[in-house]
Image (cartoon, rainbow, N blue to C red):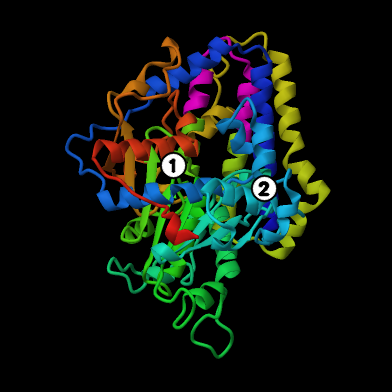
Amino acid sequence: MGVIEEDEVCSVARLLGDLVSYRASGTGHLEFLAGLALLQSNSQFPESYEDCMEAPAFHLQEAAMLHKFAEAAYTGPLLDVGRNPALFLCTWICRQGILTPWSRKWRPKLDGDNWWRGHAAAFLKFINFPAHVLRRGRICREKCKATYFVVVLHYLRCVVIAVRGTETAEDLITDGLGRACSLTVEDLDGLTNHVHGMDTSRKHYGHSGIVEAARDLFMQIEGDPKSGESESSGFLSSLIGDGCECDGYSIRIVGHSLGGAIASLLGIRLRCRFPNLYVYAYGPLPCVDSDVAEACSEFVTSIVLDNEFSSRLSYGSIRRLQVAAIKVLSQDPKADTALIFRLARRFLSASKRQRENVEEKTSEEAIDVNNSPESQHDQIYPIWEEAEAEMQQDSEEFINPFHGMASEDNPVSQFMETGPTKEDDDEAPEMFMPGLVIHIVPEGNNMSVPIWRGWPICDVTDGYKAYVANRESFKEIMVSPSMFLDHLPWRCRHALQKVLESRNLFFDLTSETDIV
């Protein structure tokens, strides 16, 4: 498992290196924007929502109320750059409590926190709650392990579990481990006796890195029953069990981006033990197959803001985008032939490795052989040396680099043949967002302006509307000027507030007399 993961990480790093080389070889900003414009022109914008059902008011109110916990989980400096670009360092130092080290003893102690307990201070400062509400948490910088915070709100009779999204390099690795893995019966505990019960005898799949992180998080906050015991004696059970401090309280699990996907899989596993549980995932990654995504709709809600990219970022969508990119590059007579061939070969090599990993389990002997220096040299270096030698000879002579070439010798043609097809569904099943999908879209469609006419203003004066969407409409990456900006957590919070205002819905999260 570890060997395969390292191979995937190295493949991603090499691919990014080639893309940077292509960018550094002379591609200007206008060419880059023109490429995005071409992809945007081929993208299909979402269908009209005139006939769609508006999002349920209760879900919108509760999602808006709990969003601050998902955003507060980002306790590092990364999001402060976006919140306060001019004074982000000062803001982060203030949030971390570095200037008030004498307050350390009053702050909760979290696993992995720094000496002055700065991450606990940053979380509490953002949600503006007293220290005693934060009962447990972990700050982690390892792949497939999530940072989380557990908050008890007595006045709401609710326990909130906030899972942090992508903030560190290790989180990016968790994001990148996107191959499908089989879900066990334990992973689907919350769906076996559900009203939308599903056939657990069938094989179901999930995003490998997210599934692993959710399993680790489950062991952190609940754990497995001890031998001979029918019920778990984990942290949540000791907090919410019969006769305990929070007996009868509801559980809300929230997270943004990667955190939302992990929260969803954690909720699916915990649902059978805690029926009064609900999950709100803001801009989550596609992480389960269609059957599981539909089955958890009663207790999981995924909220997507307009064109944000993360909710469309899956192995299948990336493969289809790779095919489209190679097609566009191959049709340009001025494109660097060597780099196109290198990209195609690398995509093809990664595709073959993915296919081999899914089709058969690698034995220990095979893993040892594949890890040997000789094997690595045989598998990787001759390909690039051969490609570079061929391209150095003929790069100046080619106008159409693929004209008159046999498909066996043409890496681009071979790569096109490996594109996702219906026959590949069992090998690489499509991943979807879990649960009920709520799509928040701006009124007036201000953000669909063609990219070559300039970047539109981010603030939408006409407000937002929220609809129940079909998860199938999020299978393809939407190239848009707002695809990255829409993923920022504070933009989702702002949009939720605008939706509530337009529908005359309000929420009151804090009541000072009840909190203190």
Amino acid type at image mark 1? Ser
In this rendering, the answer to whether 28 lies above or below 440 is above
* Magenta segment boundaries in residue numbering: 324-346
Kind of element beneath mark 1: helix
Residue 85 on image: x %, y %: 61, 27
Identify which residue is drawn at 30% across, 41% down.
500
Task: Left or right? Give the position of 138 relative to 298.
Answer: right
Identify which residue is drawn at 42% across, 40% down.
493
Overall secondary structure of the magenta stretch? helix
Q: Nearer the viewer, residue 456 or 308?
A: 456
Badge 1 density bin: few <14, some 14–19, many ≥20, Cα 10 Å: many
Kind of element beneath mark 2: helix
In this rendering, the answer to whether 35 lies above or below 464 is above
Q: Which residue is mark 2?
A: 170
Q: Nearer the viewer, residue 22 or 226?
A: 226
Q: Residue furthest bottom?
A: 228
Residue 151 on image: x %, y %: 52, 61
Q: Which residue is mark 1?
A: 311
Q: Are marks 2 and 1 in contact (CB under 8 Å)?
A: no
Identify which residue is drawn at 27% across, 23% down.
444
